[in-house]
Image (cartoon, grey):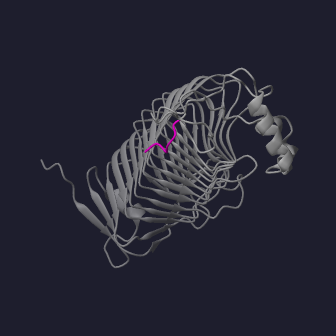
Amino acid sequence: MSSFGRTIVIGSNQTVKSVKQAIAIAKDKDTLLILPGIYKEGAMVLTKSLVIIGQNYPVLEGEHKYEILLISGNNITIKGLRFRNSGYSALNDFASIKLVDCYNVTLEGNIIEDSYFAIHISNTTNAIVRNNRIVGSPASEQLTGNGIHLWKSNHALIEHNYVKGHRDGIYFEFVTESLIRSNISEANIRYGLHFMFSNDDTYQDNIFKENGAGVAVMYSKKVRMERNQFEQNWGPSAYGILLKDITDSYISGNTFFKNTVGVHMEGSSRIEIKTNIFRQNGWAIKVQASCDDNIFERNNFLSNSFDVSTNGTMVLNNFNGNYWDKYEGYDMNKDGVGDVPYHPVSMYSMIIEQNPTALMLFRSFTVSLLDKAERAMPGLTPENLADNKPQMKYIK
C-alpha cells in the first residue's frame, strides 16, 4: 500500500469548491491544494493527518467573527495560506490557527493578518512555526492577543517569523526544550518576547525592536539567550530584557542598543552574562540587591548614560574583564588590563534609584562634582561592586 495519499484540488472552478468539503472527504496522508481565491467558511476543524498547501496565498476569511482553523491531530502541515480577520473572544482566545493536543504539526510560509491571536498552541509536542508573516492592528492590550502563543508544550521550533502589532510578539508559558531562532518581533504593544515558567529553552539570533516593554523572561531556569538584538525599547517601564526570578542561565553575544534599560535583573541567580554589547542605553544594567552569584565578563559598555545601577550596598555578583568606555585608569605594564579597578556605579545613579526626579539634573555641573568626589572618597556607592580587570580596549 502506498504511504502517500491523493491530492484534492479546491477552487471555484473545481469539483471541490470549499475547504470544509475537502477536509470532510479527505483521508489521512492526503494533500489539499487550495487555488487562489477568498474562502469564507466560518470556523473549520481539522483532526486528520493532512498537508494543506495554498497556491499564491488563497485567503481564509474570518469576517471578524470566527476562529478560522482549529487543529487537533498528528502529522499535519499548513503552508502558503493567508489567514485574515479572525474573530475576537477573550473567553475562548480565538485565533487564526489554533493547535490543541497535537503532535508533529508544521505551520510554514503563511500570512496572518488582523487576528486576535495569530497562532495559539497548547499541549503540543514537536510544533514547527516557520517563515510566517504575522501583522496585527493593535487597539489595546485587552483587545489584542499574542502573535505566536505557546502554552504547556515541548520541543517546539519557532524560526524565521516576522511578528508585528500584537500584545506580545512571542509568548511562552510552561514550554520546555524548545528553540526560538532568527525571528523579528517588533512594534508590539507589550513584549517582543514574553517568557514564563519555561525551562531548558534557547532563543538565539532574534531581533526585538521598538516593543512597548522589550522582552520579559520570568520564573524560569536553564535558559540560553544568544546573539539576539534588543533595540530601541523606550519607555518608563521598558527594557531590553527584564529578568525576574531566573536561575542557571546564559546570556551571550547579544547587542543592547538604545533601550531605556538594557538588562533589568530581579531575584536572579547564577546567570553568566558574557561577550554582550551595551551601546547607547539609558542604563546598561540594573542589578537589584535580590540578585546573587551572577557573572558579568568580557562585555563592552559604550556610550550608556549609566553603565550599572543597583538599589543596595551589598553586592554578591562578579564583574570581571569588561570594557568600559568611561574608565579613566592606566595600564603601566601594557598587558591590556587596567591597573586600577573600575567602579561602574556612580553616586548619581544611586541617588536616582532613591529619587527618580533627580534625573532632571542629568549632565549638570553639580552632578559631575558629586561623582568626582565619590570616586575619590567612596561613601554611598557599593565599594565591592568593581571590575578588578577592566579591559583597556574594545573586546572583539
Q: Choose top left, top right, bottom left or bottom right for residue 396.
A: top left
Relative to 379, 85 lies left or right? left
Does 292 appear above or below 273? above
Does the magenta segment cover residue 242?
A: no
Does the magenta segment cover residue 395?
A: yes
Relative to 244, 333 lies left or right? left
Q: Position of residue 305 (x, y in %)?
A: 70, 48
Question: 232 or 314: nearer the eye?
Answer: 314
Q: Going 69% across and 54% down the picture, which residue do you hit? A: 234
Relative to 37, 85 lies left or right? right
Q: Position of residue 307 (x, y in %)?
A: 65, 41
Number of numbered discs on residues: 0
Does 121 appear above or below 197? below
Question: 84 or 195: nearer the eye?
Answer: 195
Residue extending farthest to the front is: 332
The stretch in magenta equals: 391-396
Asked if residue 203 shows in the view, the reply is: yes
Q: Position of residue 2 (x, y in %)?
A: 13, 50
Asked if residue 118 shows in the view, the reply is: no
Q: Going 57% across and 36% down the picture, which residue do you hit? A: 330
The secondary structure that most of the magenta stretch takes on is: loop
Q: Choose top left, top right, bottom left or bottom right for residue 33.
A: bottom left
Question: 394 or 190: nearer the eye?
Answer: 394
Q: Going 77% across and 38% down the picture, which residue do you hit? A: 372
Residue extending farthest to the bottom is: 13
Does 364 appear above or below 176? below
Q: Position of residue 213 (x, y in %)?
A: 67, 49
